[in-house]
Image (cartoon, helix red, strand yellow):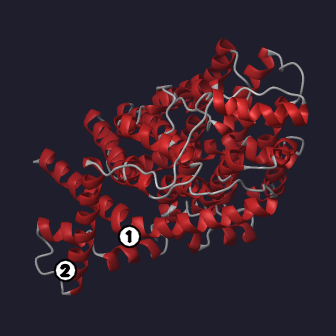
Amino acid sequence: MEAVETCVNASVSRDYGLTAKVFRASCTEYGEGAQFDTSDYAFGAVVLVLLALNIVGSLYEFYGGIGQDTLVGKGLLCFAIRRNWRRLVAPASRDPDQQLLQCLSAYRMFFKFWVVFVHIAIPFVLLVRNIEYIEQLYSYAAAHLVYNAGLIVQGFLVISAFLLAYNVLVAERKQPISGWRNLLFAIFARWLRFTPLYALVVFFTATWMRHMGEGPFWKVVVGEETSDCRRDWMLHLLYIQNYFDIDSLCMLHSWFLAVELQVTIVGAAIFFLLKSTKARQAAIAFVVTVGLVAPGVTAFIHDLDAGTLVTPEVALRRYVDAPWFNKLYKRGHTNLLCYGLGLALAYLIINLDKSDLGAEKYKKYRVVFWLLTPVTLALVASGGLFYGDGARAPLLVRALYASGVKLLFGLIMCFNIFVSIVKVDATLTRVFEWNGWTVLRRLTYCVYLVHMSVISLLAGNSATTVHASQGEMWKTFALVGSASFVIAVALFVAVEAPCAQLAGILLQRLEKKHAD
């Protein structure tokens, strides 16, 4: 470390009259690589088993699927590639209650593209040679749509909460589904929905990923994440990693999965344990209140920065050292507000009649919807107000912003979903209900899990620094996005869809056993 610091200071002092301090240094020799161990072979065995199941399942379906009503037959059909491909490209559900929600696929995809674009900026901070370009971006308002884009994950929470509440309310039209057993059943079903593919990606990151390249940036970009995943994998499978500040780079973006499961438990408890509408609405109001207060109080107590203050130093360490990220951004209780608003929105939508769709009484909101688009962008970019030189904003201002910005975004999101569902604009309806969004939406979970691995592998294998520019960022976005979707298609057909069907079979058997 001292030798590196001496070498750096020789040029820095000569050229700029400054003194540098080196805090971290890594060295990778040519041909140096990790040794294969038991965990690598274990992951290889898992891959071989999945490959064999897909081959056998596909052949079983192709040759008629004799005995497909048996448990083994049903299990093999889950892995039939042709069948799972048809599930991927199938049109949206024709159920009237579900057709009403078709527009949500467009929102999900829009936010997902935004997330991927934001994350591709990380390699530029790690590898950039023209660091002044990154610093100059802070003076452009448009750049803060990237730096402060952490706000957009609240949109996913609104949608997730709305779907949970709406589907429960629809199911209750046929029969009551409240009770502790149904609550535990719903939580287990959600965990089972997330975990198989998630566990596979964590397992890959901890094992084979470390053997997939080399270079001067490999240890910093990939090596540390691999080591952290080998240590912290259990926290991920329990979905509690967002409450442990252990300087871990293991699939850092997966904090959202933990938050989503945690707030889902809250939402499910409201709808499965409380029977009356008044009790549920009171509980939702309580969740919204807690969600509104928690970010501001947390920011005030810990003297945190407002919003997502992504300085080059924070991005260089991929947020793990940022107090605002650990205390405010990734906690479950600080993300309750928009989830609560989504639960409340379901009560508004469930009472709509068919006559409300495209009704004249809602057409007046069309102009408001289009006006709110630039307002939403301005709201996301508003975090740039806290990047100025000089003293930090007053603590009270930062605390109020932490809560207020989520409230405004959540309300705008709920309004946009409402006007999209009631079809206030014919053009908007055609765009939002395009069937292609439904197909792409089925890939969003896979894309979310793998896109950061794609970014890490690209950055880790880089042999030199890069010249940052808008063109380079868009090119990287196209490359990462394309690769992520290609991988997502394979994972959906071979892993996610089969595991989802197996989970459905398991849950049906458990439900039938309990009924007997």
Q: Which residue is mark 1?
A: 493
Is residue 482 left or right of 275 when viewed as pictured?
right
Q: Residue at x 48, y 64 (%)?
A: 442
Q: Is residue 485 above or below residue 218?
A: below
Residue 2 sits in quarter: top right
* Residue 237's disc number: none
Q: Quadrant of the N terminus?
A: top right
The residue positioned farthest toward the top in the image shown: 301
| Observer able to see residue 310 | no
Quarter-wise, where is residue 342 in the image? Answer: top right
Amino acid at dot 2:
Tyr
Q: Nearer the viewer, residue 60 or 147?
A: 147
Task: Say whether residue 65 is left or right of residue 134.
Answer: left
Report x, y in % for residue 98: 49, 62
Residue shown at 28%/48% (left/top)?
39
Which amino acid does the dot numbered 1 rest on? Val
- Tell me how far mark 2 sits from mark 1, CA to CA: 16 Å
Question: Where is residue 179 drawn, in percent x and y?
Answer: 29, 35
Which numbered disc flags the more N-terminal residue, 2 or 1?
Answer: 2
Q: Nearer the viewer, residue 465 or 242?
A: 465
Q: Which residue is mark 2?
A: 60
Q: Secondary structure at mark 2?
A: helix
Q: Position of residue 167 (x, y in %)?
A: 44, 51
Helix, strand or loop under label 1: helix
